[in-house]
Amino acid sequence: MMDLLIELFSEEIPARMQPRAREDLKRLITDGLVEAGLTYASAGAFSTPRRLVLAVEGLTPESKPVREERKGPRTDAPEKAIEGFLRATGLTLDQLERRPEKKGEAYFAVIERPGRGAPEIVAEVLEAAIRNFPWPKSMRWGSGSLRWVRPLHSILCILTDAAGTQLVPLTVDGITAGDTTRGHRFMASDPIRVSSFDDYAAKLLRAKVMLDPAQREAAIRQEAANLAFARGWEIVPDEGLMTELAGLVEWPVPLMGVIEQRFLDLPPEVLQTSMREHQKFLSARNPKTARIEGYVTVANIETPDHGATILHGNQRVLAARLSDAAFFWENDLREARAGMGDWAEGLKAVTFHAKLGSQADRVERIAALAREIAPAVGADPALAEQAARVAKLDLRSAMVGEFPELQGTMGRYYAQAAGLPDAVADAASDHYSPLGPSDEVPSAPVSVAVALADKLDTLTGFWAIDEKPTGSKDPFALRRAALGVIRLVLENQARLRSRTAFKYLLWNGLAFNHAAADSSDSSDFYSALSRIKDFVPEWDNSSDESFIEAIAKEGIKEGSGRIRLIREQRDDLLAFLHDRLKVHLRDQGIRHDIIDAVLTMPGSDDLVLVVKRAEALAAFLKTEDGTNLLQGLKRTNNILTQAEDKDGVEYSFGADPKYADTDQERALFAALDAAEPAIRSAVAAEDFPAAMSAIAALRSPVDAFFEAVQVNSDNQILRRNRLNLLSRIRETGRLIADFGRIEG
């Protein structure tokens, strides 16, 4: 067996590209080796800013000979078919074999390929990988045709076995592979000859290069923590920046600096963001004051003055950056204390979407929806509306203009500076959450109301203009918004009827479609819709006819087809939410078919109710009673379906106990008489575990019935009565869920 070492040495590779590049190098080389007939035991990829490295252990020294037989056309086939087969196999006609077949004689190609040595295969695979490497961005340099992320200087490629080390014969665009590399650019730049991976890693370490990015990251983390601890500080966690820093240096040298006193009153988020984005500094926090008072920068060199000159230069740049941040902060505070009226006016000039209006239009919609949602989540409607009107104002601030990632965070500070209630300030910060599956979900009622309104407006707006996700494309992050709605509703147990919240899809959809069809001012249309909302009870749940009648009274000439289309969009959006709910619950161990079974029940637009049903049903089906009863209900449905298809009638007219011919039938009637009211009562009280217990009592009577009774009796009176009894069993099950949708 042999070990393979590859190093591609270049100018600095951007840190963000290194993780993907490591994986791509490993994939391209190992896949190519295997396809060429070699096997290997293990492979590991590494990177520094100036090199990509792959080490492969246990590589076979040569590929095995290959003998392949391929059947071709019949010998009397058209000439062009035979010529095509010859081109595909690379053989001549006299090299083909003629063999008898059932329908005549056919040509066969026997292709034999001898085994090849590992050096030849490695050279071929590596050259293909270099020439076709999938860099996000690449460049050419000099007069060559090779493209690489940065100019490629050298290639190290050696094979090592018990007999020693051999070079792989390879030249790519004038660069010939060898067995030498270089260490740190400044501290050990002389050529280094290596004979194996262990020799390579050890010599690089002596030459001030840590090959493994995980080792560099661990060294940065440990030394930064030590420097902070010495001052009584702590490093603010920032995993993304820590990984990026490991990709910027080959020999990490963390250095601790102190922020000037004049900048310490800036919000900590501003300090951290400015230092991270502009200078890649880790922030150091004083736990006693909760302020960020220092930073850690990571140098790539050891200096005689222990980094003093480096820190001095960084300090000057940092002061300039933080002076800009302080200027933004002071100006923004003045506007916040003045009531943020200019920012509110400025939102009119910010387009949210060409078909959905400005950010100011969106704020109006969110405010109205937040006020309506508020009672369902225990929030004060007036506070919810106020918070919604304030939540987006920081988008016009200078600070958010400089650092967009601080939107919401700065909104809290500005709301506090304006003297607004804490609940309003918190909602300004929290209403964007949750942004992902692991993000914390707001629990303060006002924050929940605004967060739901924000996400529902996004969903209903884009559904109204038919900009829904398709396949893997979701440019407006609507799947994330839907998951946010689901988590907000479920984790806060918000009894929010989705159809009620979707009234704004109907309202906005009509207005948006009207505006798209008529370029004239649509303000009268909005006004008329507002009046309709006032006098049509439960206006989005009313029938199409009553809604059209209400519109006609207002003189709005919109056809019933458009309204029905928007209602279809509303139902489609609810189905989209249900699909995302399945994904969310799948991660919690609840199968999709169980969700499908409960979505057929009334109240499927109440996500909390849906989940309560699904959780109780999932738990029930894990029991022996649940498993057996499910089979009984499926058998019931199968027999009924076959009989109804055969007879052309529906057996749902009520079974009569007086026609019960066996003890088992009579026992089943009695069990149903006891179970049905108990199930109805439990479902009405949303006590689904009790409902499952009640239906579990049917297991034994149903099993006994099927064991003792022939449903399709020759006596037609008994047959009809038994089929109607089965219908009663099925309908009793449907009080809880559609068991026919459950698999297995």
Image (cartoon, rainbow, N blue to C red):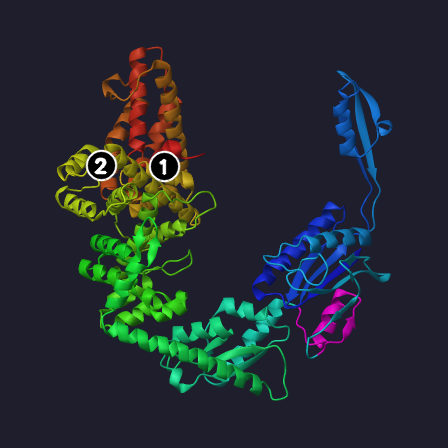
- Residue at image point 29% right, 63% down: 346
| Image coordinates for residue 86, horizontal then vertical, percent | 79, 30
Query: Mark 2 — residue?
Result: 558
- Residue at image point 60% right, 62% down: 18
Query: What residue range appears in magenta?
Result: 188-211
Is 651 displayed left or right of 306 in the figure?
left
| Crowd around label 1: few <14 · some 14–19 · many ≥20 (10 Å) | many
Which quadrant does the C terminus fall into? top left
Is 207 displayed left or right of 364 in the figure?
right
Give the label on residue 277, or none.
none
Furthest-bottom residue in this view:
305
Task: Inspect the magenta stretch and tell me whether residue 297 lies in it.
Answer: no
Residue type at the position of mark 2? Glu
How many marks are shown on the rendered structure? Answer: 2
Is 93 displayed left or right of 614 in the figure?
right
- Residue at image point 40% right, 33% down: 628
N-terminal-most mark, 1 or 2: 2
Give the quarter of the image for residue 420.
bottom left
Furthest-front residue in this view:
520
CA separation, marks 1 and 2? Answer: 37 Å
Query: Looking at this view, is 695 or 504 the one in front?
Result: 504
Circles 1 and 2 in contact, beta carbons < 8 Å: no
Which secondary structure lies at badge 2? Answer: loop
Give the label on residue 597, or none.
1
Residue type at the position of mark 1? Ala
| Image coordinates for residue 515, horizontal then vertical, percent | 27, 44
| Image coordinates for residue 395, horizontal then vertical, percent | 33, 64
| Crowd around label 2: few <14 · some 14–19 · many ≥20 (10 Å) | few
| Image coordinates for residue 344, horizontal then vertical, percent | 26, 64
